[in-house]
Amino acid sequence: MKRLLLIFSLLLLTVLVSTAQPTPGGGGPPGGGGPPVPITGLEILIGGGVLIGARYITKKKK
């Protein structure tokens, strides 16, 4: 258990350190950039699949 916790902690620390590095160009413009992207049919299908999978897992556990 201690070994698993150590490996997980090191992995988490590595991910946090690598994402905390500044970008070479100094980042994008302030305000986030362009207009927001609307939700398309693909995102709705993925969300539906997640809901069906979660429902399947909860029914299987009962």
Image (spheres, rainbow, N blue to C red):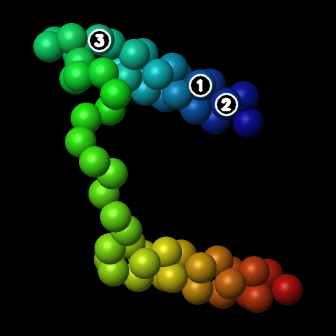
The answer to whether marks 3 and 1 mark residues whose Cβ atoms lie closer than 8 Å is no
Three-letter code for the amino acid on which mark 3 is drawn: Pro
Q: Nearer the viewer, residue 12 or 47?
A: 47
Q: State which quarter of the image contains the C terminus.
A: bottom right
Q: Residue at x 49, y 75 (%)?
A: 47
Q: Is residue 53 visible?
A: no
Q: Is residue 4 visible?
A: yes
Three-letter code for the amino acid on which mark 2 is drawn: Leu
Look at the picture and state if 24 lies above or below 51. above
Question: Residue 9 is drawn in which quadrant?
Answer: top right
- Tag of residue 34: none
Q: CA distance from mark 2 to mark 3?
A: 28 Å
Q: CA distance from mark 2 to mark 1?
A: 6 Å
How busy is the neighbourhood of tag 1: few (under 14 within 10 Å), some, or many (20 plus)?
A: few
- Residue reaching furthest right? 62
The answer to whether marks 2 and 1 mark residues whose Cβ atoms lie closer than 8 Å is yes
Three-letter code for the amino acid on which mark 1 is drawn: Ser
* Residue 8 screen position, x and y as percent: 58, 32
* Residue 54 screen position, x and y as percent: 64, 77
Q: Secondary structure at mark 1?
A: helix
Residue for badge 3: 22
| Residue 16 horizontal side relative to residue 18, left or right | right
Look at the picture and state if 7 lies above or below 35. above
Q: Residue at x 41, y 82 (%)?
A: 45
How busy is the neighbourhood of tag 3: few (under 14 within 10 Å), some, or many (20 plus)?
A: few
Question: Residue 21 is drawn in which quadrant?
Answer: top left
Residue for badge 2: 5
Q: CA distance from mark 3 to mark 1?
A: 23 Å
Look at the picture and state if 49 lies above or below 19. below
Q: Nearer the viewer, residue 60 or 31?
A: 31
Residue for badge 1: 9
* Residue 32 screen position, x and y as percent: 32, 32
